[in-house]
Amino acid sequence: MRKMAQEAGLSLRIESRATHGYHIGEPPDPRTVRHAAQRGYDLTPQRAKKLAPRDFAEFDLILACDSGHYEILESLAPEGTNIAMFRADGNDVPDPYYGGPNGFDDVLDIVERECARLIRELR
């Protein structure tokens, strides 16, 4: 999203957070990095971060990639926080680890499509 927003001339602060403390400080899975690099996205500087209470105040929109995390975000967020599903159709972003040999590419297709949609809406 960050790269696509820059290419569209938008100045957005885009961050990724986890709702659980797993893998905090670690880089993305090497398969994710590899597949993203093949499409021109550099994920090597990225490190896992955990959602903090201040994030609800600092961001105008918080997106959940699946319904389970949406429910967690709703339970943690102060009233009036703008939380939405990442996909416009409300469906979960599938887990690439269980998507077979094309899982990572299939998920990247979804992410690129939804990021392009969000950028169109922001314009």
Image: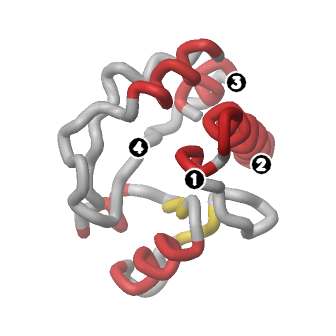
Of pointers 4 and 2, the one earlier in the residue sequence: 4
Q: Which residue is mark 1?
A: 95
Between the residue at mark 3 and the residue at mark 4, the CA separation in whole angstroms equals 18 Å
Between the residue at mark 3 and the residue at mark 1, the CA separation in whole angstroms equals 28 Å
Q: Nearer the viewer, mark 3 or mark 1?
A: 1
The residue nearer to you, when weighing 109 against 123, is 109
Other residues around mark 3 within 10 Å, as few (<14) / some (14–19) / many (≥20): few
Asked which secondary structure carries label 1, the reply is: loop
The residue nearer to you, when weighing 93 against 6, is 93
Q: Which residue is mark 2?
A: 121
- Give the vertical position of 121 relative to 7 (above or below): below
Q: Which residue is mark 3?
A: 8
Quadrant in the picture for the C terminus: top right
Q: Nearer the viewer, mark 1 or mark 4?
A: 1
Quick check: can you spot residue 119? no
Between the residue at mark 3 and the residue at mark 2, the CA separation in whole angstroms equals 12 Å
Between the residue at mark 4 and the residue at mark 2, the CA separation in whole angstroms equals 19 Å
Give the amino acid at mark 4: Glu
Asked which secondary structure carries label 3, the reply is: loop
Give the amino acid at mark 1: Asp
Other residues around mark 4 within 10 Å, as few (<14) / some (14–19) / many (≥20): few
Residue 9 x %, y %: 65, 22
Asked which secondary structure carries label 2, the reply is: helix
Q: Which mark is residue 15?
A: 4
Q: Nearer the viewer, mark 4 or mark 2?
A: 4
Residue 98 x %, y %: 59, 51
How many numbered circles does the render carry?
4
**Is label 1 in contact with label 4 (beta carbons under 8 Å)?**
no
Give the amino acid at mark 3: Ala
Residue 76 x %, y %: 34, 80
Q: Nearer the viewer, mark 2 or mark 1?
A: 1
Other residues around mark 2 within 10 Å, as few (<14) / some (14–19) / many (≥20): few
